[in-house]
Amino acid sequence: MCIMLMASLLVGPQLKAGAKGLEKIDASTFRGNTGISTIHIGSDVTDISSASFRGMMNLRSITVSESNPFYTSYSNCLYNKDMTELLCFPAALTGAVIPDSVVSIRENALYGVGEDLKEQVKSVVKEQASESMTEAQVPGAHFIHTPSGLKWKNADGSIKDPDTELMKLAASIVDTSTTEGMTQRKQLEKCFNYFVKTSSYERKLDYPLGDWTGAYAKEILSTGKGNCYNYASGFAYIAKGLGYEARVCAGTVTSSLGGRTAHAWTEVKLGDKWYIFDPEMQGAKGSGYYKQTYDSYPAGPLVKETSWTVTF
């Protein structure tokens, strides 16, 4: 995932440093050499402390010998060998590509990085970490697969059978389209595709009023038919059942006949960001409506006027 932050830089002479022949790098290794802009880490380095690069405000690039068995570099940043943990994002670096394997950030890894860029990096890594979670690792209340069928795990860890009609209907979708071994993100994708495939549009003239999301969800989950409000509420409860924060949104969308028309869709929170999931439009258009933003939504502009957070 690419993260770029534009900035005006005054670039002075580049000072390079090497860590060839060293076995350990710590806070004393480059002490007093704050002008260093580039560091190359040799194959012999086996230990790099978290404070090794603190205060190196001119550092723009770290590279690592390909034969180093413990560390590697990518896009001028330092990682552990399998690139699951970010060890140093150089303070003077204004943009980088974060590999999708990165799921954690080491202490001091973002020391000196500008606040906006720091928050972008944190957000991307947090979202990637959530993508790799298995069902057993998902916090909070959600459905889980057990030898005796799909159950509901409460936030305190206790287990119960789905005990309301709406919960049972959502559980049926999850049970049919997912397995225990899938990541939470894969379960979300499988449920979305299955829900779209097994649902069909049915035009209605009435506009939902009051506390309507549960009733509309039950209707489409039990009959397989509904309008955009049914689709939006149905998938919101499915996503909630997988452990996500989800809400039903209503507003207007560009009409295929021109002008604007009323519409409803689902928003699901992934990491620190909310994304659009529009199963009704996916069914109508065929693709392009899974995990979109308001800027990338194909039938935009999509204008949100109100929303309802769902819960069992």
Image: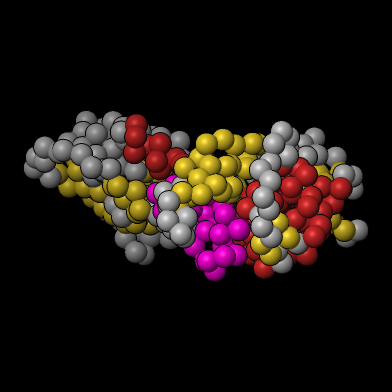
Left/right of residue 150 with respect to residue 279 in the rendered view: right
Residue 187 versus residue 241 in the image, above or below: below
Asked whether the viewer can see residue 68, the reply is yes
- The spot of residue 209 in percent (x, y) is 69, 36
For this rendering, which residue is in front, 83 or 9?
Answer: 9
Q: Quadrant of residue 30?
A: top left
Residue 146 versus residue 268 in the image, above or below: below
Q: Residue at x 68, y 53 (%)?
A: 204
For this rendering, which residue is in front, 120 or 301?
Answer: 301
Left/right of residue 199 with respect to residue 76 in the rendered view: right
Left/right of residue 156 with respect to residue 44 in the rendered view: right
Residue 271 colored in magenta in the image: yes
Asked whether the viewer can see residue 130, the reply is no
Quadrant including the C terminus: top right
For this rendering, which residue is in front, 41 or 242?
Answer: 242
For this rendering, which residue is in front, 143 or 194?
Answer: 194
How has the structure been colored for display? secondary structure
- The spot of residue 279 in percent (x, y) is 61, 58
Q: Residue at x 31, y 50 (%)?
A: 96
Q: Which residues are magenta?
A: 267-296
Q: Residue at x 49, y 62 (%)?
A: 288
